[in-house]
Image (spheres, helix red, strand yellow):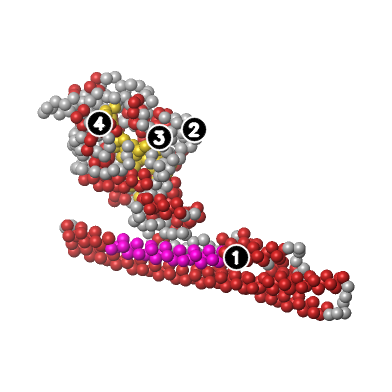
Amino acid sequence: MSAAELFPDPTDGPGPVRAVAAALRRLSDRSAVVNQAARAAAATLGPAWQGPAAESCRTELAAAASLVAASAGPLREASQVVDRYADAVARSGDEVVAVRSAYESDRQAHTREMDLLVARAGRSLARSMLVANLWSRELGAMDRHHRRYAQICDDLRRSARAAGRSLSTLAAQVVPSATAGGTPVPAIEGSLAILPLLRSERSRWVPEVPGATPPLGAAPGAVRAWWSLLTTRERARAVAAHPAVLGSMDGLPAVARSEANETVLRRMLAGLGKPGGTRIGGGPVMVNALAVAAELRRARRGTDPLTRRPVTAHLLVFAPAAFDGEGRAAISVGDLDTADNVAVIVPGLNASLRRSWSTLVSSAARITAAGRRADPSRSTATIAWMGYDAPSWTQAVGRASAERGADLLERDLVGLRAARASPPHLTLVGHSYGSTTAGAALRERATGVTDLVALGSPGMTVERASRLHLPGAHVFVGSASRDPVGYFDRFGKDPSHASFGAVRFRAEDRRRSRWRMDVDDHLRYFDPGGESLANIARIVVGDYDDVTRAAYRGEAPLIPDGIGLDPEAYREPARDVG
């Protein structure tokens, strides 16, 4: 982001405020003139004019003179307060420019140092340590700039409030007296006509200042507390000024993150195809952004299967240039801020925004709908989490991608929980290599996940379910007998064996091949009407008693797993389940 985007000017400049101060001064001067004119008129009457009419005229002129005399002082004081606020606005603009300049200088220096470091140090351990130290310094400098910017906004806010209080007091004191019993001199009424405007619309003349900038680097709980202290208008200003920052900030409500990420998405797409329009990183990034926009619209066109009302959908993560253009995104189908049950789908090999994003969001929609049918009394939301760099079919697949993805998954799960006042029943659904990533995330971390569902798993980086941060009874495995991936055991013990300690549920598809392995069965776990989707939904809503158990695979020494060792291969799959 540019310095202007990170540190926007919180006002429209001192011009509008100085115009208000000048108007107040003119009113004060005019009040003095009217006061003198009224007293002079009373004096010119002299003793020659007597009688009831003369006494009435003298009384009215005296009242008019008293009124404007009482108004002149408050008007002058108010103009001085507003002038001081105008000075503060001008000063804040200069200070914001200074913060931007310091930020740009630090960023350019950091870029030069990083280029030199990469050129000279190669790919050694020493280089990694130097890079980490350099980034630490950069983050420290960024934090200093944001603290200074926050102080500028806070100072300006205090000055704005003082000006607003002064205008409110002026309007409350002067306007009632000007209108009580009628005004004898029409010029007075016209002169004071600006005061009701200042009282009723002073937000136009005294621009509002954001309460604070986003607390970069703060823990999710602190972010949630910060957000709760902002007014509705301050939240809107923060989203407009810092959408990219807020969109990736753990601890914010899903609706706020979605609004911020959708702001970034709209701004990206608005520049496409226009002369001089904003570039968003080239072809792959453009395709990713368009894919995210399309799936968000499609998710919102869905309806609740029971109420037929439109489904709420949130854009929780949006980073279309991440992972060298593969992209990172997450959409929740269902209201994540209020849902009783929440599921998170982690996709497997070859997953990316360009290749399998639509399928992932469709799977999330199916789980949400199936969850509603399984338990109509409670709400369900499902997150399509394309949040890590999944390896492709052509890569030499090891555990490295799963371990890196586990760090990102753990962070998002903790942030999801911190954003809620009360945690939901949270189920992690890992498909294929996604179950390997999910297992790595739960192996050494407490994430708030209640249940883990592994589908077509080649292993979860552990040999026993008890090694995961979950009760053993809350690890569930769906492994179709014709799915070849479930027999690989490459990243840990086959979880469909009894010795692993998980609950195996029925996941056979009625379209399966009669005798052979079929890679299509690896892709059918979320298909509607099947055994797998129905059981997944029951787990997501906590209806464990109705999960249909499957027999465990047999184990034979020195013999690779195969259909012959799987009792599920000889059972006729159920039809139209759920």
- Name which of mark 4 and mark 2 comes first in the sequence: 2
Nearest the camera: 269 or 500? 500
Give the residues drawn in magenta, as a range. Answer: 137-164
Q: Looking at the magenta stretch, what is its main secondary structure? A: helix
- In the picture of the structure, the residue carrying the numbered disc 3 is 368
Residue 352's image quarter?
top left
- In the picture of the structure, the residue carrying the numbered disc 2 is 308
Query: Residue 455, image x and y in percent?
Result: 28, 33
- Name which of mark 1 and mark 2 comes first in the sequence: 1
Q: Residues within 10 Å of mark 1 (few under 14, many from 20)?
A: many
- In the picture of the structure, the residue carrying the numbered disc 1 is 167
- The structure residue drawn at horizontal position 32% and vertical position 39%, both measured from the top left corner, is 449
- The structure residue drawn at horizontal position 18% and vertical position 25%, both measured from the top left corner, is 554
Q: Secondary structure at mark 4?
A: loop
Report how far apart the C-alphas of labels 3 and 4 lie in the structure: 24 Å
Tell me the amino acid under the disc marked 2. Arg
Q: Residues within 10 Å of mark 2 (few under 14, many from 20)?
A: few
Please check the rendered image and state whether residue 21 is part of the magenta-colored stretch, yes or no.
Answer: no
Report how far apart the C-alphas of labels 1 and 2 lie in the structure: 51 Å
